[in-house]
Amino acid sequence: MNRNTWMGVAPGALLVALVGTLAFALAGTELAMRFGLGAITLAILIGAIASNGLPQQGHGVFRGGLTIAQRHLLRIGVALYGFNLDVQQIAQVGGRAILIDLFVASTTLALGWVIGRRLLRLDPQTVLLTSAGSAFCGAAAVLATMPTLKMSEHEALDKSAAAVATVVLYGTLAMVLYPAIYSFLGSAVADFGIYVGSTVHEVGQVVAIGGMLNEEVANAAIVTKMIRVMMLVPFLLAVSFVLARRDSSGERGAITIPWFALCFVLCAAINSLGCLLDGLVGMLRQTATLCLTAAMAALGIDSQLKRIGRAGLKSLVLGGVLFLHLVLTGGLANWLLA
């Protein structure tokens, strides 16, 4: 990397590093852990605040570093996120959890498309990003879906930020609602963990809710959530295939395979084999979190609250409908398959 290239990348990279470091520091506080706000989610919030405190004409200085974080670190982070999964853990919750996860994810995507496109008249990209965040794993799903969609850089930033906002808002509401539901139903509900894992947005939020209840609920919730995360991969492949069928000119396009999704599966398979040292796996997991946090920080820095506000109100409505669907329909599915 020559001097000119380095000077083009350094300011943005340093700003991303600063925001990411602050996000990690805040994620370790008791308040953040109580509300399930991990470094990945906090990074976009801090980045957005920092962005809107900067003069508009100054954003170009950070472009090089922000682009690297959004494109390259994002894909690396999604791929390495597979090391958080262990296929052998699925046996702990059984096939019922898989069926419930499949039902919840598929109906969330279908409902999101119907409500978003036909009633709210949202564009397809916003609908897919918001629905994916609700159906799979929150902000990480939004980030993973973003590169597979055909849209300009500014569109990707604003629509992704709006989708992540729904994850933060309704995931935080879940932190209050689910413990209340558990108290109302009674601690004898042994399968409440599957309900939590199959319907709550973020992995961190699932962990936090489980921690508020008991170890049995927490373990079942986390494993069920990991199964739901794995379902993101076929969704990404399906989106790539559908978008490739017709390009903007009406001609059949080439299928773009999201390599990071395939690497995600490979990393999960390697982790399931148990052939790596625990210390190395821990380091790879931490690297995934670092990369995703950097990508989120860049996304927040590059977003503008005015643009998000214009595109985000309907996204919040869509996210609210999907949240109610997760709580009610997801709860019904868990009860029927109990």
Image: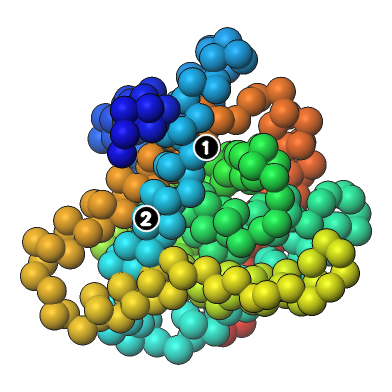
Q: Quadrant of residue 110?
A: bottom right
- Residue situated in front as seen by the camera: 25 or 261: 261
Residue at which label 1 appears: 299
Give x and y (percent) for residue 282: 17, 59
Q: Position of residue 312 (x, y in %)?
A: 73, 37
Q: Look at 65% across and 54% down and name the residue there.
A: 129
Q: Quadrant of the N terminus?
A: top left
Residue shown at 47% from the left, 80% from the top? 97
Residue 66, relative to residue 70: is it above or below? above
The image shows residue 181, relative to residue 167, as above or below, that is below
- Secondary element type, mark 1: helix
- Numbered label attached to residue 124: none
**Could you tell whether 326 is left or right of 15 in the image?**
right
Q: Position of residue 119 (x, y in %)?
A: 90, 54
Q: What is the C-alpha distance between the residues marked 2 and 1?
A: 14 Å
Name the residue type under label 1. Leu
- Residue position for label 2: 77
Report helix, strand or loop for mark 2.
helix
Q: Residue at x 10, y 67 (%)?
A: 278
User: Which residue sits at x=42%, y=42%?
Assistant: 69
Q: Is residue 327 left or right of residue 47?
A: right
Query: 10 Å neighbourhood of mark 1: few (<14), some, or many (≥20)?
Result: many
| Three-letter code, disc 2 | Gly
Is residue 8 rendered to the left or right of residue 30?
right
Crowding at label 2, few (<14), some or many (≥20) Cα neighbours within 10 Å?
many
